[in-house]
Amino acid sequence: MKSLTNYGKLSEQPPKLTIKHSWEQLVRFGWIQAQSCLFPVVIFASLAITKFLPLPLLPRYDWLLILFLLMQWWMVRAGLETRDELKVITLFHVIGLCLEIFKVHMGSWAYPEDGYSKLLGVPLYSGFMYASVASYLCQAWRRMKVDLIKWPKFYFVAPLAFAIYLNFFTHHYWLDVRWWLASLVLMVFWRSWVSYEVGGIRYRMPLAISFVLIGFFIWIAENIATFFGAWKYPNQAEVWRLVHVGKVSSWLLLVIVSFLIVATLKRIKGKNPIR
């Protein structure tokens, strides 16, 4: 990756690249990622603890909802998330919950445990798993001072995001056009880059690669979540199995939708320069 300063301008004297410096930058990058993943970490920890620890008074799904609501309140109260970021996260909660209700109705996966806070067979805590993706994007965006380079026009981005989200529903009744949509993503974002700062030095990478990387790590997280019983796919009803690698494509497209929404909202708010 090329060293950048001041939103993408190439540094005339980039720092000398040594093994020590590279390692220090990697540690800094990892620490920023860890801070940005606080909400997802709490979700995984809660799933693990509540799976093996007997809970009084309420079913497990209801305790998870209470824990996640308290965590969300604390993050805003402590200044780890802004009120604007909370609005984005709430939007993702609604989007994710709608998708969950439809997918459970279609038999794609299930929430077999009891709970008072279930809506049409879906526990309300499930929306927080989508909201946690938005939480990560918002926090990483802010902490690494993300800048988008050669971002496409709104009239390309908005219909593409809508089509990707719509395909999660329509492929049950019509063709699954995810690979056509993935091809469109490559075409639309072929010249787009994401620039970010680590330790006072700016780097950049093709936006499409960042989509793939985030989607892959969410697939790993999905395997952890299903292992701890967050939800179950039909082939996991009797015993846990690795989530099919083909699900990476689904998460990749969902990450793209998430990224496009966050980027568009930040552009509307005027808090992110897009060149």
Image: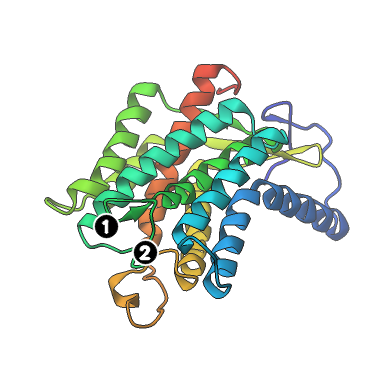
Disc number lying in front (1 or 2): 2
- Image position of 154 (left or right of 272): left
**237 w.r.t. 62: above or below:** below
Q: Which image quarter: residue 24? A: bottom right
**203 w.r.t. 103: above or below:** above
Secondary element type, mark 2? loop
Q: Which residue is mark 1?
A: 104
The quadrant the C terminus occupies is top right
User: Residue at the location (62% across, 38% down)?
Assistant: 73
Q: Which residue is mark 2?
A: 114
Q: Amino acid at mark 1?
A: Val
Q: Position of residue 182 (x, y in %)?
A: 33, 47
Q: Residues within 10 Å of mark 2 (few under 14, many from 20)?
A: some
User: Residue at the location (46% across, 26% down)?
Assistant: 264
Query: 234 and 66: which one is in front?
Result: 66
Q: Position of residue 6 (x, y in %)?
A: 73, 26
Secondary element type, mark 1? helix
Q: Position of residue 247 (x, y in %)?
A: 36, 62
Query: 185 and 111: which one is in front?
Result: 111
Query: 85 and 148: which one is in front?
Result: 85
Q: Amino acid at mark 2?
A: Asp
Q: Which image quarter: residue 141? A: top right
- Image position of 11 (left or right of 163): right
Label whose residue precedes the other's in the sequence (1 or 2): 1
How far apart are labels 1 and 2 at the CA level? 15 Å
User: Residue at the location (81% across, 58% down)?
Assistant: 23
**36 w.r.t. 154: above or below:** below
